[in-house]
Amino acid sequence: MKKRLIPSILCISSLYISSAQAENNWYAGASYGGQEISIPGRDFNTAGLIAGYEFNQFIALETRISIGTSGYSSVYSGTKDKYSEDIDSQGMFLLKASYPLLETLSIYGLVGYTSTKLEIEGVGAYNDINGNIVGSFQFANTETFNGASYGVGLDYQVTDSISIFFEHQVLPDFDPASVSESWKASTIGFTYAF
């Protein structure tokens, strides 16, 4: 009985250890990105956190949460009044499909859903019936832009646990006041696999 018990325990233990090592599928990371809208001067920067689950070396699901680090601002002509647009928050839920080019380098595609909350502040004007400005008021509002996003990227595996990446994404159209403009993002970052 002892002759069978010890090999059985060793076999089960080795299966458990290799299973635990194979379940190293969760990862987390950080990113920094520059976002450009096809309106001159509308460039935003974001910093964020990434959490993901890798089903295998080809497919992963990711969620990303970012905040704006810089936005757009201008001064109204002939006044000291300021207009500004800043990303308050940005969330993404992405499907990531990877293909290894080399042992440590992969190309990947992203497709998913992005939601961006934009804070807009400025000064509005009161006009009389002839169109003359008779006063002004401060305004602040929040607009949310939601929709599909997609992109491509490169992932370089520095160690078994650490990877760095660079990617380019097309985000949902930026369409305040029903004027639709294209919105793109280039992002760098790193991930750590647990």
Image: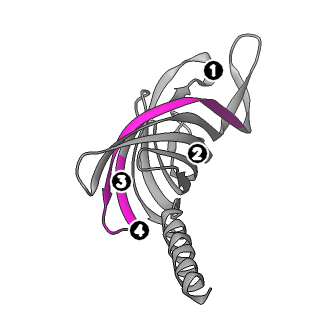
Residue identifier under label 1: 177
Image: magenta residue range: 142-166
Residue 170 in view (yes/no): no
Q: Nearer the viewer, residue 186 or 94?
A: 94
Residue identifier under label 3: 165
Ranked by sequence position, the earlier of labels 2 and 1 is 2
Spatial distance from mark 3 to mark 1, Cα to Cα?
A: 35 Å
| Circle 4 Cα neighbour tier, 10 Å, few/some/many (<14 / 14–19 / ≥20) | few
**Residue 89: image x %, image y %?**
63, 48
Ranked by sequence position, the earlier of labels 2 and 4 is 2
Q: Nearer the viewer, residue 189 or 142?
A: 189
Residue identifier under label 4: 161
Kindly identify which numbered label has been placed on residue 87.
2
SS assignment for the magenta stretch, majority: strand
Ranked by sequence position, the earlier of labels 1 and 4 is 4
Looking at numbered disc 2 in the image, what kind of residue is underneath it?
A: Ile
Q: Which quadrant holds residue 109?
A: top left
Q: Between label 1 and label 4, give the one nearer the viewer.
A: 4
Looking at numbered disc 4 in the image, what kind of residue is underneath it?
A: Ser
- Taking the view exactly as shown, the residue that stands out farthest to the left is 102
Q: Between label 2 and label 1, give the one nearer the viewer.
A: 2
Q: Residue 189 in magenta?
A: no
Looking at numbered disc 3 in the image, what kind of residue is underneath it?
A: Phe
Spatial distance from mark 2 to mark 4, Cα to Cα?
A: 31 Å
Q: Between label 2 and label 4, give the one nearer the viewer.
A: 4
Q: CB under 8 Å between callouts 3 and 4?
A: no
Asked whether, in this view, residue 80 is left or right of residue 44, the answer is: right
**Residue 110: image x %, image y %?**
45, 37
At horizontal 51% and vertical 32% (from top left) the residue drawn is 149
